[in-house]
Amino acid sequence: MKVIADPNIAAVEEAFSDLGDVQLVPGREWTPFLVRHADVLLVRSVTRVDARLLQDSRVRFVGTATSGVDHIDRTYLSHRGIAFAAALGSNAQAVAEYVVSAVLVLAEARGLCLRETTAGVIGCGQVGSRVVRLFSTVGIRCVINDPPLADSTGDARYRPLDEALGADIVTLHVPLANQGPYPTQGLIGREALSRMKSDVILINTARGGIVNESALKRRLARQDHMATVIDCWEGEPHIDPELASRSTLSTPHIAGYSADAKLRATSMLHAAACELFAISGRWSASSPMGREITLVSQSPEDAQREAVLLAYDVRDDDRTLRACLSGARGALGRSFDALRANYRERREFSAHAVHVGPDRAPVCSALADLGFRIRSALTHD
């Protein structure tokens, strides 16, 4: 069996050697000629899988190591009888932790009291629901907008879009869809932006194209107090350097790039392929523990912020992208891809053990609610 895989999928060669010969090819270099004799394709979002790529192939299984599937023509796969699997939810926790890191950074810079702050969470699926949980843990009140869930459940906790847009923070967690009953392409355009507060914090970790970047640049040019956190961009990897420079925090589509998420995605695709081909796979994902973190903060709120930013500080990734913005657009595109391909190892909160002194039960509880493992004078694990 022949497997062609994107080399930026974690442990893909080791995992899929169970199935056959694995050929690693960068995701932007795939052609119909390359895949014509392949049985299994393993891709990321940079590879478009459709009739043009597959028309002369014998492919039997396509797996994407992503939660988003807008780069896959699933109708065509179904028509051809090609099995498909996505790593749905594999990076959801990593994205939620990125969002919390960004909010804690900006809250400190602005002197915000989180318990007096509201967040409009647009999309409450795998990622959005985790964002709601983490926001609630740090004291932020959430206004949730999710029309598909509102229609299917009738639950009053799902609020109209205008209500979510009026929050102090607006964070996007919807798939990219340009048709159907719930289109999201261009969802945040001139009209939506006009309904936001002058000092809103807008976060896009969903997909490029959900925010109309031209409209956003016009809004930012007004010199109001809006802050933006952008991880997903139109036209990746050839992103708009002007927008990236103006954005408060700009990162190269790495919100979901924890080592845990990457291995989780590979494991999900490996399990799906082994089931399809009735193979008993020998590979299993494993990763070492994260850091041992010792805190100096005394209050639960300060301890949460300190632990989060020691585990993952979004400003590190902002600095690496910002350092690439002065080059030509083509060079920026290559740098954008390189930053993703060579991304440092980042671990999720649950991989880290936080050392807390004795008699600090509120601090222990606040950190455990974020997912950290706790080591204290009263707890040994």
Image (tube, rainbow, N blue to C red):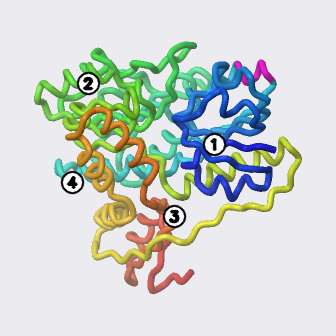
- For marks 3 and 4, the one nearer the N-term is 4
- Residue 31 in the magenta stretch? The answer is no
- For marks 1 and 4, the one nearer the N-term is 1
The quarter of the rendered structure image containing the C terminus is bottom right
Main secondary structure of the magenta stretch: helix
- For marks 2 and 3, the one nearer the N-term is 2
Depth check, mark 1 against mark 3: the one in front is 1
Q: Nearer the viewer, residue 14 or 106?
A: 14
Residue 120 shown left or right of residue 93 in the figure: left
Residue bearing mark 2: 216
Label 3 environment density (alpha carbons within 10 Å; few <14, some 14–19, many ≥20): some
Q: Helix or strand or loop: what does disc 4 sit on?
A: helix
- For marks 2 and 4, the one nearer the N-term is 4
Measured from the top left, where is residue 359 in percent x and y? 39, 81
Please give the range of residues in magenta.
76-80
CB under 8 Å between callouts 2 and 4?
Answer: no
CB under 8 Å between callouts 2 and 1?
Answer: no
Measured from the top left, where is residue 254 in percent x and y? 42, 46
Q: CA distance from mark 3 to mark 4?
A: 24 Å
Residue bearing mark 1: 87
